[in-house]
């Protein structure tokens, strides 16, 4: 019995089905999680602040400062210093980029788009 038949994970030689099942499982899990989160958000819009990850990555201190302001708070000098220090450390220790491709997991861009397309009446 092969690893994929035993439910093993990974996509090494001879185990593409395990990777494909892993891909389907994770897309389903995250689509359901996003649906739940969006329902909670729809019921409590005042408790959420939308931030683009690209904005946070490009300007962490400015972005966090904006979040605090939106919540009616102000960052302390110590908090500002801690954010600045953490950003510098993260930049210095940035690991080498790694990339994954959908086909490795038996997925297509359309499969992912379909999984994250929610009907209008679900509050998502």
Image (tube, helix red, strand yellow):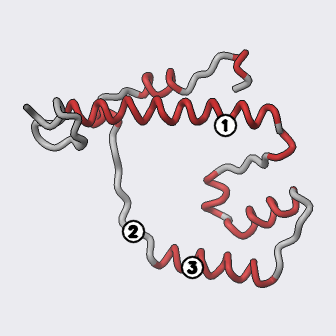
Mark 1 element type: helix
Mark 2 element type: loop
User: Vertically, is 58 above or below 120?
Assistant: below
Q: Quick one: label 1 or label 2, which is nearer the N terminus?
A: 1
Mark 2 neighbour density, 10 Å: few (under 14) some (14–19) many (20 or more): few
Q: Residue at x 87, y 62 (%)?
A: 69
Mark 1 neighbour density, 10 Å: few (under 14) some (14–19) many (20 or more): few
Q: Quick one: label 1 or label 3, which is nearer the N terminus?
A: 1
Which mark is drawn over residue 95?
Answer: 2
Image coords of residue 71 (percent x, y):
87, 58
User: Vertically, is 120 above or below 5?
Assistant: above
Which mark is drawn over residue 63?
Answer: none
Q: Residue at x 62, y 21 (%)?
A: 118
Q: Residue at x 53, y 79 (%)?
A: 89
Image coords of residue 49 (percent x, y):
78, 49
Residue that label 3 marks:
88
User: Residue 23 vs residue 39: left or right?
Assistant: left
Mark 3 element type: helix
User: Which sits in the foreground, 94 or 40?
Assistant: 40
For this orientation, the residue located farthest to the right is 72
User: Residue 56 vs residue 7: left or right?
Assistant: right
Kindly indicate the quadrant of the structure image that contains residue 2: top left
Residue that label 1 marks:
37
Image coords of residue 76 (percent x, y):
83, 79
Q: Quadrant of the C terminus?
A: top right
């Amino acid at each position: 019995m092969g690893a994929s038949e035993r439910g093993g994970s990974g996509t090494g030689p001879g185990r593409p089905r395990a990777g494909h099942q892993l891909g389907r499982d994770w897309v389903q899990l995250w689509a359901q999680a996003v649906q739940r989160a969006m329902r909670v958000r729809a019921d409590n819009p005042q408790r959420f602040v939308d931030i683009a990850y690209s904005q946070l990555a490009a300007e962490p201190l400015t972005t966090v400062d904006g979040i605090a302001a939106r919540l009616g708070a102000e960052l302390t000098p110590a908090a500002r210093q801690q954010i600045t220090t953490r950003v510098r450390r993260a930049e210095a220790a940035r690991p080498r980029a790694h990339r994954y491709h959908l086909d490795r997991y038996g997925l297509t861009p359309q499969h992912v788009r379909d999984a994250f397309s929610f009907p209008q009446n679900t509050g998502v």
